[in-house]
Amino acid sequence: MRLLVSCALVALLQLSTAARLPAAVEQALGRQLLSEKDHKYAADDKVPLWASKVGPFTNPSETYEYYSLPYCQPKDGVKHKLLGMGEVVDANRMASTPYQLQFRKNRQREAVCEQILDQEKLLKFRKAVEEDWYFQMYYDDLPVWGFIGKMEKLFKPGGVTEYKYYLFTHIDFDIKYNEDRVIEINVSTDPQEAVDISEEITDSVKAKFTYSVKWTPTLTKFEQRLARYERFPLNPVHLEIHWFSIINSCVTVLLLTGFLATILMRVLKADFIKYNKDDPAMDEEESGWKYVHGDVFRFPPYKNLFCAFVGTGTQLFYLALFVFVLALVGVFYPYNRGALYSALIALYALTAGIAGFVASSYYKQMEGELWVRNILLTCFVYCGPFLLMFSFLNTVAIVYRSTAALPFGTIVIMILIWVLVTIPLTVFGGIAGKNNRAEFFAPCRTNKYPREIPQLPWYRTTVPQMVMAGFLPFSAIYVELYYIFASVWGHKVYIIWSILAIVYIILIIVTAFITIALTYFQLAVEDHQWWWRSFLCGGSTGIFVYGYCFYYYYARSDMSGFMQTSFFFGYMAMVCFGFFLMLGTVGWRASLMFVRHIYRAIKCE
């Protein structure tokens, strides 16, 4: 196990360079990043402006190619930039534009083209304006955004409401430079130069598209040009409130955990004193967790699936850990296109051996014989549902002709990574786990026949216990969830990885402790079937997070439409399933350590 983790870390370090980790991670996936000298320009050098995508502002997943709207195209034809896998997964499609933005060359009211907008074109633009579409472009790897147009609501006499749609036809580019480097770019539209494309217009409309370019010197250094994007998401007041809310949430959770730990330790101390007394009369009369010592280490049913869950959950735990390491060293800086997706794909493939090793090792310790089936189940227990969900959502995106639909070539590359890297590493890890000589440590012998479980009240059954187990860890991450959702399913930028790392650590600690407490209460009433119960209780936080998805969608966002709704709930279902596996593994491993400790501390006959 330690060897596999070390190998994954070594692989990550070998991918890194002395300058920055993200470059190496993305180069490993075939991306050719620009070096610093490529960002240097002389006067009048042509710097291309790439159009990435357009789409409704409230539906971040519903994006389309820039020229899905009838904009002016370059005279020499539209050219597409070769993108890396992470950029394609992030729904970027770089296309050339007719705007001439030579380095340090000002332009004033330069004409791009004149178009006759017939009813078909007017309908496309009107739909875009009505749905509040935006466009995203990149200039020298710096992102820039603008809106397609505006909609005005007019109130006429008699209570009649009329909507007017206006298409922006002029764009102002304000670019700042420092010597031979581009430092900053901003885009603004002129509301005075907008074409009326309202519904009452039945004839064609003549539109002249123009742009202006203004270059301004600045003292900001090239190395600091991304700092403005780091300051953009949260102003100092909001950041301070964010820290206070996180600290308040963490302190509350830690206090509750501390109180529970104190009570549990006092009860356990009394139990140890009572159960270690040599009093036969007391043994006949009393009941409690000591008297299930012959069944507590009885292996769970469906141990093949159980071990596959534990192996995959362990892999996802280390995957999250490695992502936090990369984030804290500065890999995922704002608008580093597709860096997070590239890292997730690479890390998932590299950590596959951990899943195979852990699943196969525990399966052998539990005296399982179908180890080949166990390895195959480990390969597909998470990837299988994810593949089905991806196939459905990608089909929806294809029907919508959205850039969220992955091209055939990208899908082939991802399948090859899975077939040639992920599955072989899982198999190799499984073989290593099968040949591992470690045996399952049980302080007590297991009886031949299982002990009958007494009738229990309803609140001690699985579902109520899962509700109690998931509530406390969820309360620890509730505040942070909004910022994460606003970043993933919105247009905000998440940069406070240090806070997220702290919340992640507290989530793991609280999940482990609350599962231990519930396992103790379960054993105290002589219910020895704690294996699956501890896993389900630990992973129940994932169910709470999926419940939060419904609250966020209906109360905190303006998302709408079948595509956006299916993408949101579909991919969040897979994320929450991953949470379930990871936290379930944490809860079970913590409970296993606890059970071994308490039964090692008493006399078992």
Image: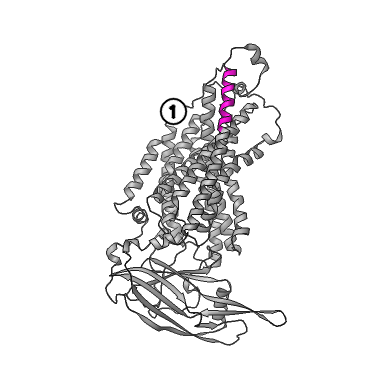
- What residue type is disc 1 on? Ala
How many other residues sit within 10 Å of disc 1, few (<14), some (14-19) or many (≥20)?
A: few
Residue for badge 1: 438
Residue range corresponding to the magenta coloring: 261-278
Colour scheme employed for the rendering of this structure: one colour
Where does residue 514 sit, x and y in percent of width and height?
Answer: 57, 36
**Along the viewing direction, whichever of 522 and 480 lies nearer the viewer:** 480
Indicate yes or no whether the magenta region holds residue 464: no
Answer with the quarter of the image where residue 111 lies.
Answer: bottom left
Where does residue 298 sit, x and y in percent of width and height?
Answer: 57, 27
**Along the viewing direction, whichever of 183 and 526 lies nearer the viewer:** 183
Indicate yes or no whether the magenta region holds residue 273: yes
Magenta: main secondary structure equals helix
> Disc 1 on helix, strand or loop?
loop
Q: Is residue 502 above or below residue 226?
A: above
Any part of residue 528 in sight: no
Q: Is residue 458 above or below residue 66?
A: above
Tell me which residue sits at (55%, 67%) in the image.
400
Answer with the quarter of the image where residue 272 lies.
Answer: top right
Any part of residue 442 in sight: yes
Where does residue 280 sit, x and y in percent of width and height?
Answer: 63, 11
Q: Is residue 357 above or below residue 39?
A: above
For this orientation, the residue located farthest to the right is 158
Quadrant for the C terminus in the image = top right
